[in-house]
Amino acid sequence: MLLVYTHKITPRLTYTFKHICKRVLGLEVSFTSKVEDFIAHDSIKMTYTKQPLSNELFVRSNELLFETGLSDLDINVQQWDETKGFFATGERSDLPFDIFAASFYLLSRYEEYLPHVKDTYGRFVATESLAYNHKFLNQPVVDIWAKKLKTVLQERFEDYEFPERKYSVKPVIDVPMAYYYRKKGLLRSVGGAVNDLRRFKLGQFYQRFSVLMGFKRDPYDTFKWIINRQKTFKFKFMVLFLVGDYSTYDKNININKREFVTLIKSMADYCNVGIKASYLALDDISILKKEKSKLESIINTELKGVRHSYSKLNLPVSYRNLIELEINQDFSMGYVDTLGFRAGTCTPFQFYDLDYEVQTPLQINPYQFIDAALLKYKSQLDKVEHLQKIIKEVKQVDGTLIPVFHNYSLSDMSRWKGYKSLFNLILDSAE
């Protein structure tokens, strides 16, 4: 066990050290403010304060983990070997940067509470982030920093054996619309057909007719393929169904349709199942509660996770609503148009509520990319290249790769040509 001496034990400090030491490095950690207890400890130890006690392993602390609330931070990002760092520590420190304060800044999403420009959906965008503007968004810097800490600890405590963790994959499949043509109801189907003809989309009209007549499979119906893929892997896919009411933003099948219910049940037999929370549920906990109850009544068990429509988050309210409804897994943390590490890590972490200064039970599963973000790369070769770069970054720190696909991006539609092979590339990377 690692013992950390510090002048003040705070919720921020315990939260950050536990993520870096326990979740990333697999190392139990405890804290003390008593010098005699620190001296008596006969295993690995370090001090995290302003001055070292003697010649022990020492990381000079920034004030961030001892503060409460938000303040205007002066952040100077600098090069650190193959990565970046900030909150410089000075010569006496065994690490040139306070990785704990820097990690807390990224994990707590501190910058998302500060004034920033939002997009048309009210989302925090990559270009507003410290990581994007200082060109380290493409690296899981928190995990890289943790490995640097491990190296320093190993040099000081040669006999201590650190546990090893393995690279893993946690695929997420969003289902905002189970079928493109089927089960839409007479009014929507007729309206769609008339619209096809009015716009001279004769090919689409023919496809719609063929699907509705049962001659062809609906293009969005990729569920048998997904199940067959799931059967060949031990790790579970996370499939998230939109079960909210029809609205301007959400246009899935009515949850009262028997075939839709059967589909959800069949997917739950093989995969983990959760909800894709509707756009309106983001700001209304009563709607979210209703959607949660709907899904749980279908699968007869607690749902395994949530992802918000359009990856929209209103911090901290969005996450507080999940906590109040006892939903403990979120998959909304990422950027819809950019590949990278929004929270600086590829290790699932707990949500820290900056207003209440407390670690919560909600586990955030940060995704590194969503299928639509790859559309900006025109060729399949470019898509593969950028995907492999992300996989390599996660593998180098033995982290968890979390990609987000949709049922329709695994179809044979021309817009999504080659995405099945991208999905398979990710699955095969775990072997």
Image: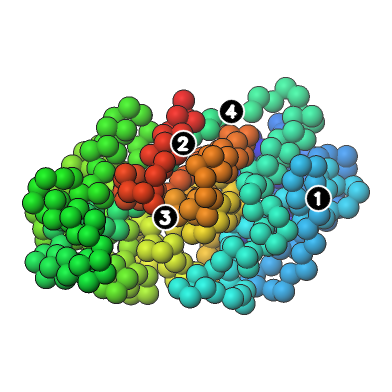
Q: How is the image coloured?
A: rainbow
In the rendered structure, the answer to whether residue 2 lies left or right of residue 76 reads: left
The circle on residue 330 is 3
Q: Are marks 3 and 2 in contact (CB under 8 Å)?
A: no
Query: Which of 191 and 365 lies nearest the eye of the viewer?
Result: 191
In the picture, which quadrant includes the N terminus?
A: top right
In the figure, is residue 424 to the left or right of 80? left
Residue at 46% x, 34% y: name it: 425
- Mark 2 or mark 4, which is nearer the start of the sequence? 4
- Residue occupied by mark 1: 79
Q: What SS does tag 4 mark?
A: loop
Label 2 Cα crowd, 10 Å radius (few <14 / some 14-19 / many 20+):
many
Q: Residues within 10 Å of mark 4 (few under 14, many from 20)?
A: few
- Give SS at disc 2: helix
Question: Which residue corresponds to mark 4?
Answer: 164
Tell me what residue is drawn at x 32 percent, y 27 percent: 232
> Quick one: label 1 or label 4, which is nearer the N terminus?
1
SS type, badge 3: strand
Mark 1 vs mark 3, CA separation in Å: 32 Å
Cα separation, mark 3 vs mark 4, equals 26 Å
Left or right: 329, with 295 as reference point: right
Q: Residue at x 63, y 58 (%)?
A: 106
Task: Say which amino acid is labelled 3.
Answer: Asp
In this rendering, the answer to whether 166 lies above or below 184 is above
